[in-house]
Amino acid sequence: MDLLEQLETSLHYRFKNKQLLIEALTHKSYKQPYNNERLEFLGDAVLDLIVGEYLFSQFPGFDEGKLSKLRASLVNEEGFTRLANHVTLGNYIYLSNAEENNGGRQKPSLLSNAYEAVIGAIYLEAGLEQARTITVRLLEAVHPDMSLDTLFKDYKTTLQELTQAHFGITPEYKLIGSRGPDHKKEFEVAVLIENREYGRSVGKSKKIAQQEAAGKAIELLNKELS
């Protein structure tokens, strides 16, 4: 079984047009007449629709605010990177030697973009229903107990994994202050890595503030590491 067939097995989908899959996996550094940026653009829009529709049907009691919060925690670089890692997408991306030597196969930006491009390619070849089936299967495999609480927990877990991998330490959460009456108190928390602040947030509990600060820190770290 060649590499592309391994990926197709992980996706539970066989491409009729193998060149379309190759294009979806081709980073611009590979210096071909094509790359995956256009398919990435398409896949981003397709995933936004699929995830939004999925959350709408799965959480009938949630209002727009909660649904938007859930979608925002899934439809982003970190969320797509987790889905990409589930199918070991980094093993299949076509990169220049320089980009590969620079850790390109582990870069969240590359993995996220390639995942979007692959879904865009599936949508082009097989339509929305096939793209939806694959995306929902991966979502449910990566998030078996999807809720606001579990997705927020993922922020802290993901940040700890990132900081341990790149700095050899765990992040520090510092309570900056609190405000408001006891029945309506808000807490401001900052997250520090090597004594540098990477995110700050205010929440109705220290836990919520920590989780949202961790989400901001992940976004900043991913930009710095990409």
Image (tube, rainbow, N blue to C red):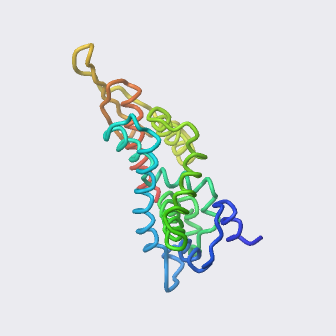
Q: What residue is shown at x 32% (from left), y 35% (from top)?
A: 201
Q: What residue is shown at x 22% (from left), y 19% (from top)?
A: 180
Question: Which of the pair 146/56 is nearer the observer?
Answer: 56
From the image, which quarter does the N terminus lie in?
A: bottom right
Residue 130: quarter of image = bottom right
Indicate the position of residue 190 as horizontal and vertical percent values: 35, 34
Residue furthest top as drawn: 182
Residue furthest right as drawn: 1
Is 69 placed above or below 173 here? below
Question: Which of the pair 13/199 is nearer the observer?
Answer: 13
Q: How many numbered marks have been drawn onto this rendered protein structure? A: 0
Residue furthest bottom as drawn: 33
Is 106 placed above or below 96 here? above
Name the side, left or right, on which 95 lies relative to 113.
right
Question: Which of the pair 132/69 is nearer the observer?
Answer: 132
Q: What residue is shown at x 52% (from left), y 45% (from top)?
A: 162
Indicate the position of residue 98 as horizontal and vertical percent values: 55, 73
Is 76 placed above or below 58 here? below
Indicate the position of residue 11 as horizontal and vertical percent values: 63, 61
Q: What residue is shown at x 58% (from left), y 63% (from top)?
A: 105
Residue 43 in view (yes/no): yes
Name the side, left or right, on which 184 lies relative to 21.
left
Residue 194 in view (yes/no): no
Indicate the position of residue 86 as horizontal and vertical percent values: 62, 53
